C-alpha cells in the first residue's frame, strides 16, 4: 500500500478551506486588487475550465509572459492541476531567445501582461510561434495589438463554473517549466514535475528552509518568471499566508509602500533590488517595522547588505543559493544554535555564506583532480548536487545533458568551499573565476569588499585577458552621487590591498553609471567584458609587485 502521489492541488485546497479570508493582494495598472484564498481557488477552477474549453489537454504546455500579480498566481495552480504544464517565460530576454524558447517548448496558449504586449509582438512575428493557438492578455480588455487570436483574461475565465473536477495526477506529471537565462549559449529548458514542486514546497516550509507561518505577509519581488518566484506562490499558499504581488517592474518606492501598507513580514529577491531599496530608504521616510526577514539569492548578497538590514532595520537577511535546475532552493544560511552567543562579526561571516544544504538534498564538492575536497573552508572545487527537486536532464538537449550531469548528480558550475560547520560558500561561477599567474582570484569576494565601501553604490569585477598573467581583475564601480572618484579609487585599492593578497587588487577601477544586468537581474559580466577595450591592460601594465609568484 502506498499513499497518494505528491501533487500541488492539496496546498490550495487547504488554504481555501482553512484560510478563506487570508488575502492575495496584487499591484496592477488599475491599482491594488485583493481577494481571499476562497476566491483564488474559485478562479483557478474557472481558469482550468477555460483551458479545457480552449482545447488544452493533459501534457500541453501553456506559457506566461508576465510580472507578479494575482492572475499570474492563478495560472500557477490552474494550469498544472488540470494536467497541463506551466511554462513561465522571462520577458526581459532578447527576442531571438524568446523565439527559441517558444519553439522548443511548443507552447499552445500564451498569457501576456498588457505592459508586455508590445515586447511580445516583436518576438511573436516569427514562425517560431507557430504552435501558439491563442494569446490571452492579463486584463479586463484587449489592447490594440497584432497578436492574433487574442482575448482578455476576464472574458476568458469569466463565464466558467467555479468548481472543477481536478484529475488525480501522478507525481511525475510535468507541472512547470523554466529556461535557464542562457548567458552562454542557448537557454536550456528545465521541467518541474508535480512531485518536484511538492518536495521543494515542503522543504521551503521547514525552519531550515524559509519557515513560513500562516501569520506571515509574504511578498515575492523575485519575478514569477524566474524559477517560479523561488517557489513562493506554492509555499506561501501551503502556509495559508497573506501574499502580496508587486506587479509590473516595481520601483523601490512601490516596494516600500507595499511593505508599509500591507504589513509585509517576509520578502524575497536578488541583491540589486535590496541595494536599490536601501538607497531609497536613506533618502525617504517609510515605515519598515513590519518587515522581519528577506531571502536574498540569485547572486551573492554582499555582507554589507546583510549587516545594514540587520543594524538599521532589524531585518534578518537569509542568504540562499539555488539554480533554475534546483527549482531553485538548494542552500539557506541559517545560524546553528551553537552560534547564538557568537559575536556579531562571526555571525555575519557565517550568514554571508550561501549556507546549509536544504533538508532532502545532498551535495559534494569535486576538485580539479576529480576527488572530493575536504570541508575545511579552504579547499575548493565544483559543487555537485542531487535530490528530489533537482533536475536530472534538460528538455530536448542531449549534448547539454552529457556535459552537465554525472549519473544523478547535477554539476552546478559553481566553485565553492565548505567549512567544518557545513556552510557552503560560492567562490565564483567556474567561468567567472579570475586566473592570474596560476592563482585564483574570487570576483565575488572582491565585489563584496567593494560594495562594503560607503561610497560605492554597486560594483562588479571581471577578469580581462592579460599576456603575462593570463587574466587580471578589473573593477567596475558605480559611485554614490557626488563622490570624488580619484579619492574613492585610492581608498578602494588601499582597502583591498590590506584585506587580500596584493595581486588581488584590480589593475583598474573603471567608474560607470550602472552595472549592466541580465534578464534575471544579475550583473552581466559578459557585456562588461565585451565593452572593455583598454590598451593599458596589455602586457607590462601590471606592476611587478602585483604578481602572485613574487609574494
Ligand atoms: P539561475 O539558474 O539563473 O537562477 O542561476 C543560477 C546561478 O546563480 C547559480 O549557479 C549561481 O552561480 C548563481 N547564484 C544563485 N544564488 C547565488 C548566491 N546566493 N550567491 C552567489 N551566486 C548565486
Image: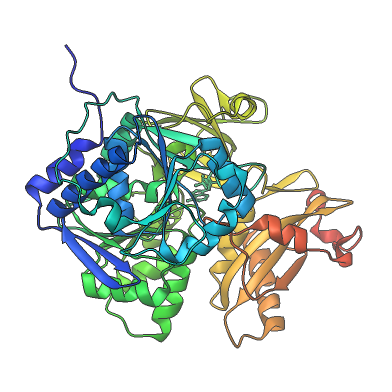
- Front residue of this view, candidates 479 and 376: 479
Residue lying furthest left in this view? 18
Residue 511, position as x, y percentages in the image? 69, 75
Taking 86 as reference, is 266 above or below it?
below
Relative placement, left or right, of 234 versus 463 is left
Residue lying furthest right in this view? 540
Taking 140 as reference, is 352 above or below it?
above
Residue 24, position as x, y percentages in the image? 21, 59
Name the residue located 66 percent from the left edge and 76 percent from the top edge: 491
Residue 410, position as x, y percentages in the image? 52, 29
Taking 149 as reference, is 375 above or below it?
above
Relative placement, left or right, of 214 versus 441 is left
What is the quadrant of residue 519 in the picture? bottom right
Residue lying furthest top in this view? 1
Q: Can residue 392 be seen in this view?
A: yes
Name the residue located 27 percent from the left edge and 44 percent from the top edge: 50
- Front residue of this view, candidates 363 and 186: 186
What is the quadrant of residue 122 in the picture? bottom right
In which quadrant is the N terminus drawn?
Answer: top left
- Front residue of this view, candidates 484 and 199: 199
Q: Can residue 428 be seen in this view?
A: no
Colour scheme of the rendered structure: rainbow
Relative placement, left or right, of 42 versus 476 is left
Residue 2, position as x, y percentages in the image? 19, 15
What is the quadrant of residue 101 in the picture? top right
Number of on-image labels: 0
Name the residue located 84 percent from the left edge and 50 percent from the top edge: 469
Residue lying furthest front in this view? 149
Amino acid at each position: 500500500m502506498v499513499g497518494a502521489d505528491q501533487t500541488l492541488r492539496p496546498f490550495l485546497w487547504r488554504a481555501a478551506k482553512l484560510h478563506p479570508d487570508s488575502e492575495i493582494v496584487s499591484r496592477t495598472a488599475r491599482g491594488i486588487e485583493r481577494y481571499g484564498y476562497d476566491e483564488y481557488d474559485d478562479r483557478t477552477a474557472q481558469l482550468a475550465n477555460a483551458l479545457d474549453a480552449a482545447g488544452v489537454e493533459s501534457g500541453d504546455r501553456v506559457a506566461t509572459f508576465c510580472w507578479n500579480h494575482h492572475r499570474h498566481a492563478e495560472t500557477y495552480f490552474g494550469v498544472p492541476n488540470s494536467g497541463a504544464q506551466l511554462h513561465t517565460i522571462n520577458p526581459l530576454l532578447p527576442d531571438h531567445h524568446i523565439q527559441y524558447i517558444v519553439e522548443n517548448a511548443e507552447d499552445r496558449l500564451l498569457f501576456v501582461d498588457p505592459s508586455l504586449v508590445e515586447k511580445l509582438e516583436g518576438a511573436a512575428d516569427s514562425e517560431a510561434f507557430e504552435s501558439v493557438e491563442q494569446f490571452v492578455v492579463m486584463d479586463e480588455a484587449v489592447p490594440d495589438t497584432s497578436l492574433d487570436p487574442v482575448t482578455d483574461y476576464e472574458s476568458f475565465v469569466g463565464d466558467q463554473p467555479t468548481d472543477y473536477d481536478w484529475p488525480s495526477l501522478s507525481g511525475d506529471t510535468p507541472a512547470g517549466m523554466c529556461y535557464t537565462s542562457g548567458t552562454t549559449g542557448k537557454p536550456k529548458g528545465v521541467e518541474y514535475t508535480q512531485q518536484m514542486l511538492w518536495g521543494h514546497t515542503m522543504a521551503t516550509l521547514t525552519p531550515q528552509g524559509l519557515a513560513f507561518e500562516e501569520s506571515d505577509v509574504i511578498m515575492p519581488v523575485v519575478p514569477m518568471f524566474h524559477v517560479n518566484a523561488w517557489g513562493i506562490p506554492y509555499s506561501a499558499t501551503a502556509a495559508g499566508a497573506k501574499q502580496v504581488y508587486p506587479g509590473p517592474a516595481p520601483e523601490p518606492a512601490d516596494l516600500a509602500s507595499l511593505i508599509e501598507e500591507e504589513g509585509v513580514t517576509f520578502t524575497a529577491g536578488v541583491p540589486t533590488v535590496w541595494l536599490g531599496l536601501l538607497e531609497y530608504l536613506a533618502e525617504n521616510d517609510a515605515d519598515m517595522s513590519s518587515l522581519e526577514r528577506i531571502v536574498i539569492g540569485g547572486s551573492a548578497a554582499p555582507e554589507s547588505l546583510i549587516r545594514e538590514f540587520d543594524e538599521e532595520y532589524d531585518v534578518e537577511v537569509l542568504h540562499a543559493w539555488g539554480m533554475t535546475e534546483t527549482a531553485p532552493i538548494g542552500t539557506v544560511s541559517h545560524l546553528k544554535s551553537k552560534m547564538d552567543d557568537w559575536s556579531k562579526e562571526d555571525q555575519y561571516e557565517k550568514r554571508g555564506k550561501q549556507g546549509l544544504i536544504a533538508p532532502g538534498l545532498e551535495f559534494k564538492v569535486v576538485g580539479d583532480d576529480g576527488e572530493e575536497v575536504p570541508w575545511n573552508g579552504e579547499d575548493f572545487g565544483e559543487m555537485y548536487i542531487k535530490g528530489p527537486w533537482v533536475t536530472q536532464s534538460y528538455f530536448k538537449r542531449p549534448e547539454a545533458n552529457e556535459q552537465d550531469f554525472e549519473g544523478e548528480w547535477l554539476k552546478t558550475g559553481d566553485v565553492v568551499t565548505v567549512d567544518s560547520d557545513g556552510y557552503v560558500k560560492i567562490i565564483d561561477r567556474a567561468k567567472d573565476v579570475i586566473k592570474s599567474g596560476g592563482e585564483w582570484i574570487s570576483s565575488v569576494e572582491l565585489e563584496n569588499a567593494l560594495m562594503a565601501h560607503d561610497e560605492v553604490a554597486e560594483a562588479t569585477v571581471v577578469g580581462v585577458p592579460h599576456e603575462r598573467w593570463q587574466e587580471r581583475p578589473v573593477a567596475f564601480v558605480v559611485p554614490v552621487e557626488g563622490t570624488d572618484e580619484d579619492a574613492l579609487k585610492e581608498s578602494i585599492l588601499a582597502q583591498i590591498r590590506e584585506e587580500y593578497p596584493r595581486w588581488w587588487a584590480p589593475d583598474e577601477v573603471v567608474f560607470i553609471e550602472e552595472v549592466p544586468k541580465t534578464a534575471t537581474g544579475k550583473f552581466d559580466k559578459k557585456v562588461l567584458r565585451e565593452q572593455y577595450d583598454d590598451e593599458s591592460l596589455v602586457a607590462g601594465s601590471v606592476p611587478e609587485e602585483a604578481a602572485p609568484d613574487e609574494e
